[in-house]
Image: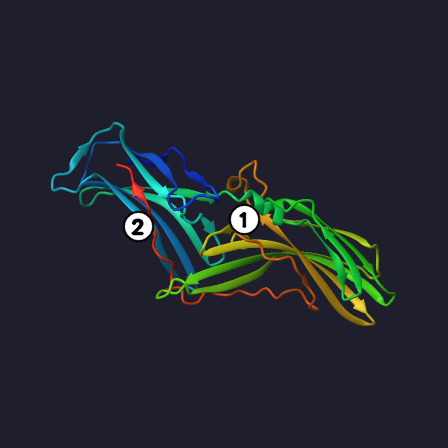
């Protein structure tokens, strides 16, 4: 295919990390250039660039988009007489100051927050326009104190039936990492038999949707699902110490990185289930540990803490079965959060 030339957006930095203590007055500055090198002389009517951040919610086949921030640049205003661009390099610099309070980029089961640039150079009729796109990623630096909320061990006595101790080496887990889950169990009387153990990787997504007429009225919808399970069953009690190795899958439509904003929160837990036979009746106990799943590019190398704003309390599930993971679709997706367009400033 014949090349039109180079038309691209170049950024000095395409990943910004804002601090946990940044307020509405804090900003970060985006700098870049729109580069245009036509292969052959071409007439251009207009060159414009736009930056946009969107919150996208999905409900079945429907998609609803809410604009969070928007800004445009006109490098060549539209006029009747097109301007001739010859075969040389044209550079159009731009800057944009954005508030640090913008929600971070994220990908969830039924929602995304995305930021990016789009540029178009409009040619005369019957000629192909020049187009370019460039994404921008915004991350939030986790509060160092949050790491103290993580616990890599859960222990106790369940219903005076069995004593348990479940532990993992670390709470920060990268996709593709194999995690050894140590499960120590001691039946408290002879008619209690351990049948097997199971480890479940669960993903929890919270959607916070403010009412269109009353922003203080927030509807919270929770979605839970099981991403991956590893089991070990045996015909006798076996040993009191079990090590289940579970691999954290790669990020995909099934598994997403931990992320948090005032609208969407994605978090993960490792559930350890001990299957029991008590007086001839089969039952089970489940305990869990919160974990942080993040790719290297989303976490500072010197940070070992979570990006979620607040962790749920540790708990033991005393039901006979583990929590039922089901798929919840956000209702009333037309009631979306307020715009951020009034909360940024541009730099000429």
> Residue at left 63%, top 44%?
177
Left or right position of 49 against 170: left
Q: Which residue is mark 1?
A: 251
Q: Which residue is mark 2?
A: 342
Asked where in the image residue 118 lies, by quadrant, the reply is top left
Query: How would you rate the neighbour count of disc 2 (Cα within 10 Å): few for under 14, some for 14-19, many for 20 or more?
Result: few
Asked where in the image residue 28 lies, by quadrant, the reply is top left
Q: Quadrant of the N terminus?
A: top left
> Residue at left 57%, top 45%?
145
Q: Position of residue 97 (x, y in %)?
A: 34, 40
Q: 265 and 223: which one is in front?
A: 265
> Residue at left 40%, top 42%?
136
145 in relation to 282, above or below: above
Q: Are marks 1 and 2 in contact (CB under 8 Å)?
A: no
Circle 1 SS class? loop
Whether residue 175 can be seen here: no
Q: Position of residue 247 (x, y in %)?
A: 65, 48
């Amino acid at each position: 295919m014949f090349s039109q030339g180079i038309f691209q957006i170049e950024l000095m930095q395409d990943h910004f990390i804002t601090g946990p203590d940044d307020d509405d007055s804090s900003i970060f500055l985006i700098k870049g250039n729109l580069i245009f090198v036509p292969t052959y002389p071409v007439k251009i009517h207009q060159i414009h660039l736009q930056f946009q951040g969107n919150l996208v919610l999905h409900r079945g086949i429907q998609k609803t988009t809410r604009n969070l921030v928007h800004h445009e640049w006109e490098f060549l205003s539209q006029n009747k007489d097109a301007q001739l661009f010859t075969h040389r390099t044209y550079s159009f610099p731009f800057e944009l100051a954005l508030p640090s309070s913008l929600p971070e980029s994220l990908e969830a089961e039924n929602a995304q927050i995305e930021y990016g640039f789009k540029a178009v150079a409009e040619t005369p009729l019957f000629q192909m326009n020049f187009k370019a796109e460039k994404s921008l990623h915004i991350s939030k630096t986790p509060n160092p104190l949050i790491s103290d909320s993580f616990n890599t061990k859960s222990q106790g006595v369940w219903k005076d039936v069995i004593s348990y101790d479940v532990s993992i080496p670390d709470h920060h887990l990268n996709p593709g990492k194999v995690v050894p889950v140590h499960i120590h169990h001691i039946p408290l009387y002879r008619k209690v038999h351990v049948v097997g153990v199971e480890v479940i990787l669960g993903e929890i997504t919270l959607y916070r949707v403010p009412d269109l007429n009353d922003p203080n009225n927030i509807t919270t919808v929770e979605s839970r699902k099981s991403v991956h399970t590893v089991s070990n069953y045996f015909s006798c009690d076996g040993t009191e110490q079990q090590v289940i190795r579970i691999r954290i899958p790669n990020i995909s439509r099934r598994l997403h990185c931990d992320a948090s904003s005032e609208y969407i929160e994605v978090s993960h837990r490792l559930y350890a289930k001990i299957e029991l036979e008590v007086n001839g009746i089969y039952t089970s106990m489940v305990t869990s540990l919160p974990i942080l799943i993040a790719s290297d590019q989303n976490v500072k190398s010197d940070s070992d803490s979570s990006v979620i704003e607040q962790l749920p309390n540790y708990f033991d599930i005393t039901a006979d079965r583990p929590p039922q993971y089901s798929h919840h679709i956000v209702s009333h997706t037309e009631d979306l959060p307020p715009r951020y367009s009034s909360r940024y400033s541009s730099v000429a």
